[in-house]
Image (tube, rainbow, N blue to C red):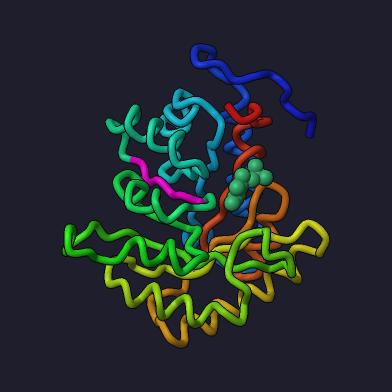
Amino acid sequence: MAADTRLPSASSHDDGLEARLASVRQSIADAARAAGRSADELTLIVVTKYHPASLVRDLAALGVTDVGENRHQEAQAKAAELSDLDLTWHFIGQLQSKKARQVRRYAHVVQSLDRDSVVDAFAPTEAEPEPLVVDGFVQVNLTDDPGRGGVQPDAVEAMVERVLGTGTIRLRGVMAVAPLDEEPRRAFARLREVSARVAAIAPDATDISAGMSNDHAEAIAEGATHLRIGTAITGKRPTAP
Ligand SMILES: *Cc1c(COP(=O)(O)O)cnc(C)c1O
């Protein structure tokens, strides 16, 4: 597939968008069939980070219901601009505890719970005894590099207990990014094992958010329920604004 090097602009409609979305949906359906699964079990989250709000609007017009963003200020501005649309916003980036309470105002799902301080920021306080409830995923680090974000697999149970303890996060499951230097399917198989351990202590938390543009078929083969796909649908991302 040729890379799309055009910069998206707020005004020009990208004619390739619909075709790329259709092609990814087809690829998801094919991978589901190959894995003996129903595509109805899979939620496609289109990752729109760095792209203008107009692209998100175009995606919504094409039937996209779920979008993913990884930077708080950008996500907050887009969600405000698009508040007339019925979208589910997923926050998928590294979160600072000071920002966590603000993210909750527009994000329906926080997929990057990976530190005690971030999880604790969602808990009730004296000033706010009944805070908003969000859906959450514990992010799992599938590499040995602590800088990559996510909880090490052997620390996931403790993090799950902490999330459940807040009373304000509905735990949905686990989220991960495949390592760069490993066959993605092997890494996603480990995530699936972690997911089974989580479900043993939190029976409703069976979702698995895994799979991006280049590895969604492998993720589907290993039980992913939520796919976070950016460039294969949006085209090349502009550089960070
Ligand atoms: C950017 C991003 C994606 C999407 O990546 P693509 O390769 O563009 O599909 C998925 N998940 C996370 C956490 C991301 O930051």
**In the picture shown, does residue 194 fall above or below 98?**
below
Left or right of 93 on screen, residue 236? right
Q: Position of residue 91 (x, y in %)?
A: 46, 49
Left or right of 178 on screen, residue 161? left
Q: Let me know if residue 15 is in the magenta part.
A: no
Q: 195 or 76, which is in the foreground?
A: 76
Quarter-of-image position of residue 7? top right
Q: 52 or 33, which is in the foreground?
A: 52
Quarter-of-image position of residue 156? bottom right
| Quadrant where the image shows the C terminus | top right
Q: Position of residue 126 (x, y in %)?
A: 17, 64
Q: Majority secondary structure of the magenta segment?
A: strand
| Quadrant where the image shows the N terminus | top right
Q: Residue at x 78, y 56 (%)?
A: 180
Q: Residue at x 17, y 58 (%)?
A: 127
**In the picture shown, does residue 229 fall above or below 13?**
below
Q: Residue at x 52, y 63 (%)?
A: 225
**In the picture shown, does residue 182 fall above or below 85?**
below
Residue range corresponding to the magenta coloring = 87-92
